[in-house]
Amino acid sequence: MIEEGRRRNSRKPWRGDLPIATIAELAGVSPPTVSKVLNGRGGVGEQTRQRVEALLRDHGYRRRRASGTAHCIEVVFHQMLPSIAMEILRGVQEVAGARDCTVGFTDVRRRVLAGLPWMEPLLLRQPTAVITVFSLVTADQGERFLAGGIPLVAIDPVGEMFPTPAVGANNWSGALAATRHLLDLGHRQIGLITGPVKDLSARARLDGFRAALDYAGVPFDETLERRGVFTFEEGRDLGTQLLARPDRPTAVVCGNDLQAFGVYAAAREAGLRIPEDLSVVGFDDVDQAAWLAPPLTTVRQPFGEIGATAARLALALADGQSLSQERYELGTALVVRASTAPPAARAPG
């Protein structure tokens, strides 16, 4: 997973002995200007900032830490369920604690909603590394962390962030297993509620769903697909649409557990019983999934292990090591509970 030596891209290895004065001389600016760029401060023209950041990246600048400065991994969240966030933090802490490294976290949702910058406070705090569980992080922002000498690892990013390493679950195989489970029970009229199509994880789950149908020789009925976001409200509203059809599905695969909770509400409003009249499958296996009535069949993501893997990668980068790949996918597991059953026989229409 992690290898010594050069990184797979063309950038030079991290070095800690390159002084700011040298970067300033190469860029044709003053050392304070380089310091402003490193710390995300204003007062620097955009072209100058880009020139300094490019030099920092190309020369593998790594910020020198003051003697006695505590090592810290900062974990950045955005609109994350508390149960998932705690599992990720637990995994990060297990790895960081063994290295005498503290773990900090921040939720940037309010700053993003208010239109305020969220990266600059992180750059000012100068953490040892940053792990983002933040769907809005872009490749350009990843380059800014790199230029600032702060290693960055992304958990389940929306899009490609090369060369930022990314960690996530194998969404494709998880959706494949969930759909095969319903097919094995005898379902053929299966509805699908997905997440945003630009989201890599949502796209992979859609592909896994369709692959399971292909393997079983069941045509994909696009009229049974609904696309939304990963919220309870979307699950309820899109579930209501599917269940209002005269040929309503006998089962629904949801993009995550929150959407599945919404489908439960839609089924109650439609007077349908789960699983007698409708089977439901989620994705994530949050704590609440086991508390529903009936308990939800879902795909478990190993959030603790994902957090631990991200921490190992982040600390490896901080140590100047190279990584053997850009994306790391961990296995999922189908957890079968009481929300799925064979379809009930329907009276002829």
Image: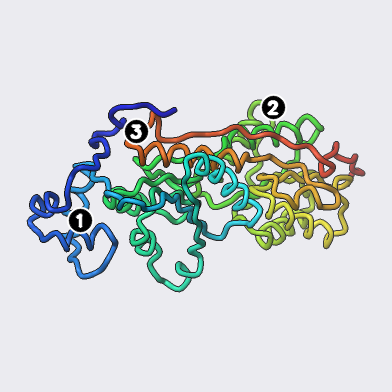
Give x and y (percent) for residue 266.
Answer: 78, 59
Residue at left 45%, top 73%? 114
Q: Residue furthest bottom?
A: 114
Q: Earlier in the sequence, mark 3 or mark 1?
A: 1
- Disc assigned to residue 3: none
Q: Position of residue 148 (x, y in %)?
A: 28, 52
Judged from this view, the residue extending furthest toward the right is 347
The answer for how far apart the CA atoms under marks 3 and 1 are is: 26 Å
Using the image, tell me which numbered label, if any, was put on residue 321: 3
Label 3 close to label 1 by CB (< 8 Å): no
Q: Nearer the viewer, residue 195 or 24?
A: 24
Question: Which of the two discs, 3 and 2, labels the residue nearer the N terminus?
Answer: 2
Frontmost residue, 179 versus 322: 322
The residue at the point 28 percent across, 61 percent down is 39
- Secondary element under disc 2, as helix, strand or loop, is helix
Numbered disc 1: secondary structure = helix
On the question of residue 191 being in view, the answer is no
Nearest the eye: 45 or 262: 45
Q: Position of residue 214 (x, y in %)?
A: 63, 29
The relative height of residue 125 versus residue 91 in the rendered view (above or below) is: below
Quarter residue 10 falls in: top left
Q: Which residue is mark 1?
A: 50
Asked if residue 1 lies left or right of residue 330, the reply is left
Real-space CA distance between mark 1 and mark 2, rounded to the nearest whole angstrom = 52 Å
Using the image, tell me which numbered label, if any, was put on residue 216. 2
User: In the rendered structure, which amino acid carries the disc numbered 2?
Assistant: Ala
